[in-house]
Amino acid sequence: MTIAEASKKYDISQDTLRYYERIGLIPPVPRTKSGIRNYDEVSCGWIEFIKCMRGAGMQIEALIEYVGLFQQGDSTAGARKAILIEQRNLLVDKIETIKACVDRLNYKIESYDKILAKTEEMLSKGQKAPDCGTDEKC
């Protein structure tokens, strides 16, 4: 698969793919006799992995370290596992923070639902709707 095809398939710019290869996030991609990158199944697997990890917020430095350790072989399995555990823990913390934010937003939305319901009720009775402003006790 050419770099243009890989770029389209994984929705990553060609420049980003070249950059990832240059800094070692993607191991050297096989090339054709004319020197054109030819992304094989292994290369594509690395693209998928890196895209997933970057999407989850994993730092490039941690990924570079992980890939470097991977290339050293099975003797680094413990260190690679430790990197992934650390990244998972960071992601779990982030998920908890996001969940707390979603809970807060749900509370605020429910508050506005109550204000809007009260306003609709008053308007349907021909009454003037209250001006709640920032007072959500209306």
Image (cartoon, helix red, strand yellow):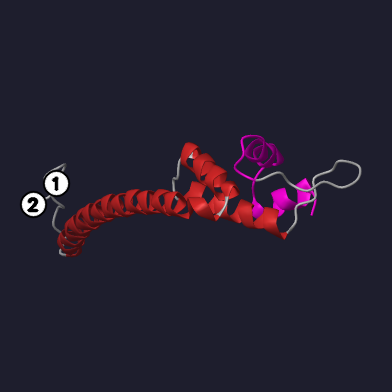
Q: Secondary structure at mark 1?
A: loop
Q: Residue at x 82, y 46 (%)?
A: 31
Q: Secondary structure at mark 2?
A: loop
Q: Which residues are magenta?
A: 1-26
Using the image, tell me which numbered label, if any, was put on residue 137. Answer: 2
Q: The N terminus lies in which quarter of the figure?
A: bottom right
Q: Is residue 25 left or right of residue 37?
A: left
Return the residue at label 1: 132
Q: Give amino acid for label 1.
A: Cys
Query: Disc 2 or disc 1, which is closer to the eye?
Result: 2
The reply to whether the C-beta atoms of the residues labelled 2 and 1 are less than 8 Å apart is: yes
The residue nearer to you, when weighing 114 against 122, is 114
The residue nearer to you, when weighing 120 against 41, is 41
Mark closer to the chain start, 2 or 1:
1
* Above or below, 96 relative to 13: below
Q: Residue at x 29, y 51 (%)?
A: 93
Using the image, tell me which numbered label, if any, was put on residue 9. Answer: none
User: Counting other residues with Cα less than 10 Å from the Cα at mark 1, is it few (<14), some (14-19), or many (20 or more)?
Assistant: few
Q: Give amino acid for label 2.
A: Lys
Q: What distance separates the C-alpha of mark 2 from that of mark 1?
A: 8 Å
* Above or below, 71 relative to 103: above
Q: Position of residue 105 (x, y in %)?
A: 25, 53
